[in-house]
Image: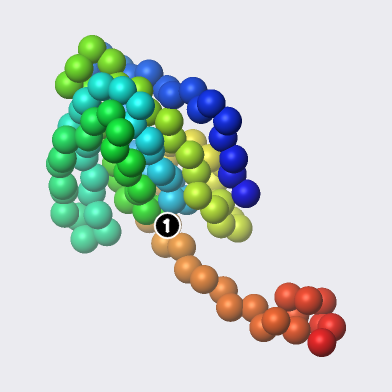
């Protein structure tokens, strides 16, 4: 369970933007100040750009490349990770060209008997 008390945002500027990257897990951004142009490249290779600003929330799926170029003096983002799947990289920024894979999350349906250790 994730719980954040008084979250502190990361600060980005036009000279220090969020570079294009991906994660092995979903990531959610809470925008806490400023504006920027967000970019994402979906699984089909389609690039989408949109304005993101204070008060917005953006959830980025695992494997989707994303980044943002601030359009104000500073852009304040509080990012937090979704579930970290088994076999994932340690949370951080990864690059498709370097890693040579695109992660896809899926659900494994474990029978309830196994979940409860074989007890009924």
* Residue 102 location (% of width, % of height): 38, 55
* Residue 103 location (% of width, % of height): 42, 57
Using residue 93 as the reference point, say whether residue 109 is left or right of it: right
- Which residue carries the number 1 mark? 103
Using residue 23 as the reference point, say whether residue 117 is left or right of it: right
Q: Is residue 95 visible?
A: no
> Which of the two residues, 80 or 14, is positioned nearer the viewer here?
80
* Residue 95 location (% of width, % of height): 37, 41
Q: Residue at coordinates 48% horizontally, 39% vertically from top-left?
A: 80
Q: Residue at coordinates 38% horizontally, 38% vertically from top-left?
A: 29
Classify 5 as above or below 57.
above
Classify 51 as above or below 44.
above
Q: Quadrant of residue 118?
A: bottom right
Q: Is residue 79 visible?
A: yes
Classify 75 as above or below 85.
above
* Residue 98 location (% of width, % of height): 38, 42
Using residue 16 as the reference point, say whether residue 36 is left or right of it: left
Q: Residue at coordinates 33% horizontally, 31% vertically from top-left?
A: 31
Q: Quadrant of residue 52?
A: top left
Quadrant of the drawing holding the C terminus: bottom right
Q: Residue at coordinates 23% horizontally, 12% vertically from top-left?
A: 73
Counting every numbered tag in the picture gives 1
> Which of the two residues, 98 or 38, is positioned nearer the viewer here?
38
């Amino acid at each position: 369970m994730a719980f954040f008390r008084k979250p502190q945002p990361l600060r980005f500027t036009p000279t220090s933007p969020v570079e294009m990257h991906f994660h092995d897990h979903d990531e959610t951004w809470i925008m806490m100040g400023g504006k920027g142009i967000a970019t994402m490249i979906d699984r089909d290779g389609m690039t989408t750009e949109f304005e993101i600003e204070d008060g917005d929330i953006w959830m980025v799926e695992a494997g989707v490349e994303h980044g943002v170029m601030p359009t104000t003096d500073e852009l304040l983002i509080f990012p937090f990770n979704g579930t970290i799947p088994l076999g994932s990289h340690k949370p951080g920024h990864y690059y498709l060209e370097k890693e040579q894979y695109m992660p896809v999350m899926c659900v494994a349906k474990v029978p309830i008997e196994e979940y409860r250790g074989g007890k009924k």
